[in-house]
Image (tube, grey):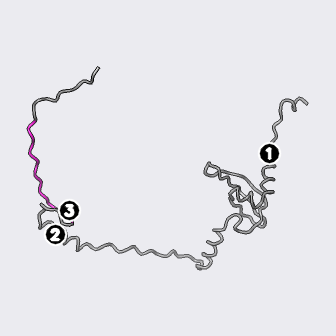
Amino acid sequence: MGKKRTRKSSKKEPQKEPAEYAVEEVLDQRLVNGKPEENLNPQLVSAFLEAQKNVKEKPAPVKRKSSTDKPETEAKKKDVTEELHGFNRNLEPERIISATDISGELPIMFLMKWKDSDEADLVPAHEAYSHCPQVVISFYEERLKWLSGPEDEAQ
C-alpha cells in the first residue's frame, strides 16, 4: 500500500499586498555593515540619538558598612577561628558521636567530640581513618551486632 497523496486545491489564492507601517518612534538603532539601517525617518533617528546622549547612567549604589559594637580585629579573629574545623584546630578526638552521609553519596562524615572542647565537628571519614584509627574502630565496635543463627539459639 502506498501513501495517500492529497491534492492541493488548484485555485490560487490572490496574494494580499503587504500592509505598510509608519514608524512613530525609534526605540533602538540597528546597524547593518556598520551603518544605520535605511528606510527610517531621519528626524526620528536624530531624536533617538539625542535622547541617548541625554540619558545619564545611574550612579553605583553606595554600600553602607554595618554598624557593629565590636572592633574589627575581634571580628576578624572570630572569622579565623570559625574557619578551622576538625583536625585543623589541632585538638585530640575524644570519641565519634555519630556517622552520616550528608549528600546521600559515599563521603561519610563523622560527628566527632573533641577533648577539652564543648564543640563537635563533622569530619570526613578518610581524615578520621588516617588521624585516629583507634577511635574509629571503637565507634564501630560499639555499634556492632552479632546475628545468631538457628543453631546457636538451640543451645
Instruction: Name the amino acid, label 3.
Output: Val
Instruction: Name the image quarter holding the C terminus.
Output: top right
Position in image of residue 102 (x %, y %):
63, 52
Q: Residue at x 25, y 72 (%)?
A: 55
The answer to whether residue 53 is above or below residue 145 is: below
Residue 11, given in percent of the width and then of the height, sits at: 10, 31
Q: Residues within 10 Å of mark 2 (few under 14, many from 20)?
A: few
Verify whether residue 15 appears in magenta.
yes
**Residue 23 is inside the magenta segment:** yes
Q: Picture quarter containing residue 154?
A: top right
The disc at residue 32 is 3
Secondary structure mostly taken by the magenta-highlighted segment of the chain: loop
Q: Residue flagged by tag 2: what amino acid is it?
A: Ala
Q: Residue furthest right?
A: 155
Earlier along the polypeptide chain: callout 2 or callout 3?
3
The residue wearing badge 1 is 144
Q: Secondary structure at mark 3?
A: strand
Secondary structure at numbered mark 2: helix
Q: Which contiguous range is marked in magenta?
A: 13-33
Q: Position of residue 89 (x, y in %)?
A: 71, 68
**Residue highlighted by disc 2:** 47
Residue found at x 84% / y 30%: 150
- Dots 3 and 1: beta carbons under 8 Å? no
